[in-house]
Image: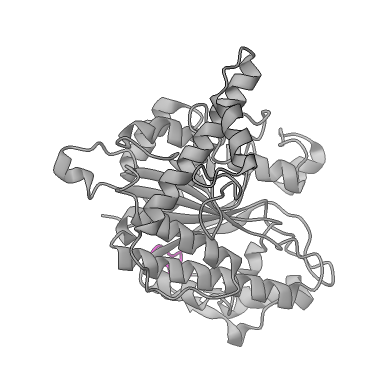
Amino acid sequence: MLRRKFLKEGLCSLAGASAATTMLRNLGFAAGIASPTAVQSDYKALICVFLYGGNDGDNTLIPYGQNEYNSYASSRSVVAVPRPSLLPINPVNSDGRQFALHPSLTEMQSLFGQKKLAIAANTGVLMAPTTREQIIAKSVPLPPQLFSHNDQQVQWQTSWPDQLPKTGWGGRMADVMNALNTNPQISMSVSLAGSNVFQVGSEVFPYMVSKEGTISLWYYNEAWGNPETIVTKAMLDATYGNVLDRSYSEIFKRSIENEKRLSTALRKAPTITTPFPQNNDLAGQLKMVARLISVRNDLGMRRQVFFCTADGFDTHGEQVNTHANLLRGISQALGAFYQATVELGVADKVTTFTASDFGRTYKSNGKGSDHGWGNHHFIRRRRQRR
């Protein structure tokens, strides 16, 4: 399956477990483990990189043919990217039109040229194919609060634009796939960016770490015997009749145990020699993802879902320089992460994709762009289509 088909069908079908299983099996994500020998090599990971604020996809993927570019430049006016600076690409599946990437996306252009990157074009959260005229006429159902950051972030992450959020499609995927993990030591879903709806499942919930590693209670160490540890341990060892007290105690214990397991595994992690860019928050998150993947066997993981983020994409003003810097950071981070997966020998086992609130208006507001809908997203291909 092409990654484009993955997103198109995945966002629609993951609401049902049976449909999810079928689709994910086609992707290889749901493949069963045939033998103990296969356990060591049978690994798949999915990494969501969410670009908060609404990335300007029309300045990410740009028409390159002269006539199409002229129309683009006329509509986008002050935010149009000069044609000589663009990075041309050659899609495998083409209708004859020419396209290019923003000049900041040098690493992405290289991956695309190697057929390691695909683009899902004009993708967004709607309930039905919709035109501007239909919106004006109110002739089609629309997601609630269309163009709202918070609402459309949740709709993207749940794939349910017409329902209250309950679970994310990454969480529903984890519910279906978790049985393929052998004696997992931590949650199948790991977030490098705090709480999110994407990874919330009915059975599997995200475990949160930072780009530096596990998040621990700095004061809690039973070897120290300090008052804080003594009081905390007494609270955890107590027996509670109230269900809320009991649940809180169990979650507290589990978080301490998970931190111990993961920190122990990370201390044994192999050194990753691939250089990651400094002062790049997404790069730091993805480096930690690479480290977590490197200890997958110690953690009993065969399937994993990761969540990373970058923000600042709400470019209503000063877009030209701001967007260029943002895209440069994304490209460098994703480029380094791909090289790290090659170093770890899992480049063909990892699928990374970008998502964002929505696209942006094609016409500039004079300084930037405003909230739109369809957007263009990158998908790091695990393998070429056969």
Furthest residue in direction top, as rendered = 241
Residue 45: image location, x then y, percent: 39, 49
Residue 248: image location, x then y, percent: 61, 27
The answer to whether any part of residue 187 appears in the image is: yes
Furthest residue in direction right, as rendered = 366
Q: Find the magenta span and give its range.
A: 91-96
**Viewer-side residue, 359 vs 135:** 359
Residue 238: image location, x then y, percent: 57, 22
Instruction: Residue at 80% x, 64% y: name it.
Output: 316
Q: Reply above or below: 20 against 226.
A: above
**Viewer-side residue, 51 vs 115:** 51
Q: Is residue 93 magenta?
A: yes
**Viewer-side residue, 184 vs 50:** 184
How many tags in the picture? 0
In which quadrant of the rendered image does the C terminus lie?
bottom left
The chief SS type of the magenta part is: loop
Q: Is residue 142 magenta?
A: no
Q: Quadrant of residue 82?
A: bottom right
Q: Reply above or below: 120 against 61.
A: above
Residue 345: image location, x then y, percent: 28, 62
User: On the picture, is 15 further left or further right than 33?
Assistant: right
Q: Quadrant of residue 54?
A: bottom right
